[in-house]
Amino acid sequence: MTTGPPQDGVAYPRELSAGARALAARCVPRVNELARRMSRTAPEEARTQQGLPIDVKTTEVAAAARYGLRLFVRRTPGGDYASFRERAARHAEEGMPLHLLLRAHATGTHLLWKTLRDTAGPGEESALIELSGLLLLIQEGMAGAVAETYLDEQAALVAEQREQREAFVRGLLDGTNADTSQHVAFGIEHGGLVLYLRTDRAVAPIASLRPGVTRQPVSVAAMSRISPVVARRRRRRIQTVLDRAFGTEVLTLLHDDDGHAIVPARPGAVVPPVPPDGLADRLRRACGDEVRIAAVPVDRPSAIADAARTACEVVRVAHASGRPPGLHRLNDVLLEFHLSRRDESSGLIAALLDPIGERPDLVETLRIHLEHQQDRRGTARRLGLHPNTVDNRLARIAELTGLDLTSPRGTALALAALLLRERPEPVRRSADRGGAG
């Protein structure tokens, strides 16, 4: 007996023996009858079909049995699984688990095999073996076609849902999403907690602070190209950490080295969620880098956009003022946040550090010294220097800038100058500049 060319990955016998065809033909009425009674099966069949939805019993199981029988009777050389693929795509869209769908097809194949076994008489053993072997090949091809189509459809659905979620979160963050039905659907009608997270690798080390030049964040991609696969894995790990930490599905819009997250308020909760202990450490392990997080609570969806901007600023200020990575709240950097707001005096204050703008060692020493509450020994340990070296650098800073770092006023001015140099200039519209001539 020869075999035909493979279709859907399976090569089927081109011809069946006369005995096998006769046995298959006698099974036709029995299979049809069993298929019609699928929802009222005997105890033995009920055990094999336990947990299968009724529509699956009456469609997929019966279809699998009839399909195998049709191949036998018609001696079809290959398989055509178009109808199975169509139903697999529909079941994926409906959310039916793949294991139930594959189990239904296996049950249909088992049903056909039992029908063949019960119908075969003495002397038909070889015909039964022949049909059983072909039946296994049919099941292999059918299962492969169904699983492939189901997974393709599911991947497309997941990608579509992800795009919809990201578009929704993007609208919340820029303040353009006012759809209350979506707010309810995603559980944020009562607000929640807005997070901004950024790895410390997202900002390049300071090369210089030249007069009039504002330091801009440098993307990680510009320093060490992260492969798309690594970036996707890291985003998935971050999502998993956030979901588990807050015990709910967190809305996220994540990039390679930073991103926002919105934690929905629990139904009936009178206060917004709070970051759990150890969140920064868990995210650090997921990212493989030190992470800064800012958390800003909101009591309504319309406040999310402002909270997102505040969270970004809190992280920026925390980094600019030399605070170590971890969780930052507005109260933690309240003075620094206030000092970093721009007004008519901002340019003059920022210019106070122009004399050391080309000395990153002095700028970093000043930053760490202020962060350590002007503790020279703590500053020395952080920088890996001798305390006398720190003293010499601080004296040089005071000499070049004229700032008295031992007085409250001089300290406040130095801190404000650092923060204002870190903050990008706001984009001014043409109308602000007087418009075109």
Image: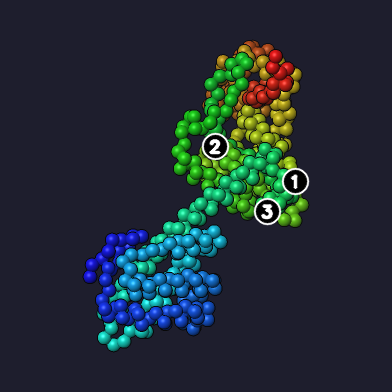
Q: What kind of element bears circle 1?
A: loop
Q: Residue 412: horizontal and vertical position, in percent?
A: 72, 23
Left or right of residue 371: residue 135: left
Q: What residue sits 55% from the left and 45% below the top?
A: 238
In three-dimensional space, the C-alpha distance between marks 3 and 1, rounded to whole angstroms, equals: 14 Å
Label 3, on which residue? 185
Q: Is residue 155 left or right of residue 341?
A: left
Q: Name the residue tied to disc 1.
A: 300
Query: Residue 83, labelled with which disc?
Result: none
Cα distance between the residues tagged 3 and 2 = 29 Å
x and y, in percent, of residue 137 in the image? 33, 67
| Mark closer to the chain start, 3 or 2 | 3
Mark 2 vs 1: CB contact within 8 A: no
Front residue of 272/332: it is 272
Label 2 and label 1: CA atoms lie apart by 28 Å
* Foreground disc of the pair 3, 2: 3
Q: Quadrant of the C terminus?
A: top right
Q: Is residue 288 above or below residue 160?
A: above
Q: Residue furthest right?
A: 270
Amino acid type of the residue that numbered disc 3 sits on in the rendered structure:
Ala
Q: Does residue 417 appear in this view?
A: yes
Q: Quadrant of residue 269?
A: bottom right
* SS label for mark 3: helix
| Residue type, numbered disc 1 | Arg
Tag of residue 257: 2
| Extreme-front residue of the structure | 74
Between marks 2 and 1 in the image, the one whose residue lies nearer the viewer = 1
Q: Give residue 315's quadrant in the image.
A: top right
Pair 3/1: label in front: 3
Q: Is residue 179 above or below residue 202?
A: below
The residue located at (54%, 71%) in the rendering is 55
